[in-house]
Image (tube, rainbow, N blue to C red):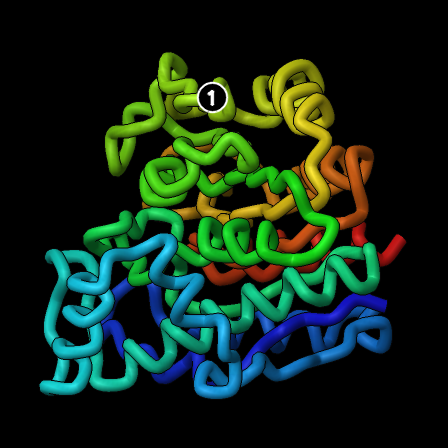
Amino acid sequence: MLSVIYSQEFLDHNTGRYHPECPERLTVIVNALKSAAFAEKITWRSPTAASQRRSLMSTLLKAHTPTYINKVKEIATTGGGYLDGDTPVSPRSYDVALLAVSAWMDGVDTVLATKNPDFVLARPPGHHAESHTGMGFCLFSNAAIAALYALEQPGVKRVAILDWDVHHGNGTQAIVETHPQIAYCSLHQYPCYPGTGKASERGLHDNVLNLPLPPGTDITAYQPLIENKVIPFLANFHADLLIVSAGYDANEADPLASINLQPADYALFTDACLGVTRKILFGLEGGYDFPSLSQSVLATIERCLM
């Protein structure tokens, strides 16, 4: 069995007509999972309400400044607006973003309790959100917050983050690279938005591994990097928890980048991670072509069930 943490409230973050980061992204995944051959092995769970999670705001403040958090809240409560040209905030966005953070924290709790994978199916995504601002469709830095929260739990001394989204997680890296107890690894297209993620960026404690890839790259280049770079980096860190920023926009069919992966390739990624540990929290980031997005999530979850 594997639990998927999901709420229909995640659909209430309204990004506007034609925006690629839209509620339908979650709807197609939910429909695909419920009709999958392994559907009976999935447990659907609602996230803990943000108002009921006493540690949420204190953990959020470890990743984001009070000024920025209040800015998102103010934009939402005054009718909505934009953090930048790509990152809208609707009247419900602040509450939904807090619920997404709470869902990622729930995922941490579940993985630590069961020592098995969990999947957070939430939006808005988070890996571009820096401490002082949101950008690139992201409001709060979910993966970084989850890592910081995990370090507050008994027995957790180290947390690793693997970001396989096609875009570099500039926000995640900026927040965690000063923490010797957190490692961050990213495979991403370069050059591409947001322009960060050079191989020379190693973090303050040699805890960052960036693997930039040129447009047109396919699994034949990814696989040796995962085997020879990613897995040794993760294994040598000896993390008590692995968090995966699971973006699926490196698919060939995705409209926002130019990497040529196929949905089945994410099964290989997942197998590699499971070879390091079963204590994995997967959380949705990007992925904007509905068919390849849903099939990639299915590939990830199916491998976790084997």
Image location (x, y in percent) of residue 104: 55, 64
Q: Is 9 drawn above or below residue 293 in the view shown? A: below
Q: Is residue 223 visible?
A: no
Q: Amino acid at mark 1?
A: His
Q: Residue furthest right?
A: 306
> Which is more toward the observer, 225 or 214?
225
Secondary element under disc 1, as helix, strand or loop, is: loop
Q: Is 273 drawn above or below residue 198 in the view shown? A: below
Quarter holding residue 73: bottom left
The residue at 29%/77% (across/down) is: 94
Mark 1 nearby-residue class (10 Å; few <14, some 14–19, many ≥20): few
Q: Is residue 231 visible?
A: yes
The residue at 49%/18% (across/down) is: 206
> Which is more toward the observer, 45 or 19?
45
Quarter holding residue 230: top right
Q: Is 137 drawn above or below residue 229 in the view shown? A: below
Image location (x, y in percent) of residue 275: 82, 34
The residue at 46%/68% (across/down) is: 101
Q: Is residue 243 left or right of residue 35?
A: left
> Which is more toward the observer, 201 or 293?
201
The residue at 56%/35% (across/down) is: 181
Q: According to the image, label 1 marks what residue?
A: 205
Quarter of the picture containing the N terminus is bottom right
- Exactly how many numbered labels are in the figure? 1
Q: Is residue 50 left or right of residue 196?
A: right
Q: Is residue 179 left or right of residue 193?
A: right
Image location (x, y in percent) of residue 11: 41, 81
> Which is more toward the observer, 177 or 12?
177
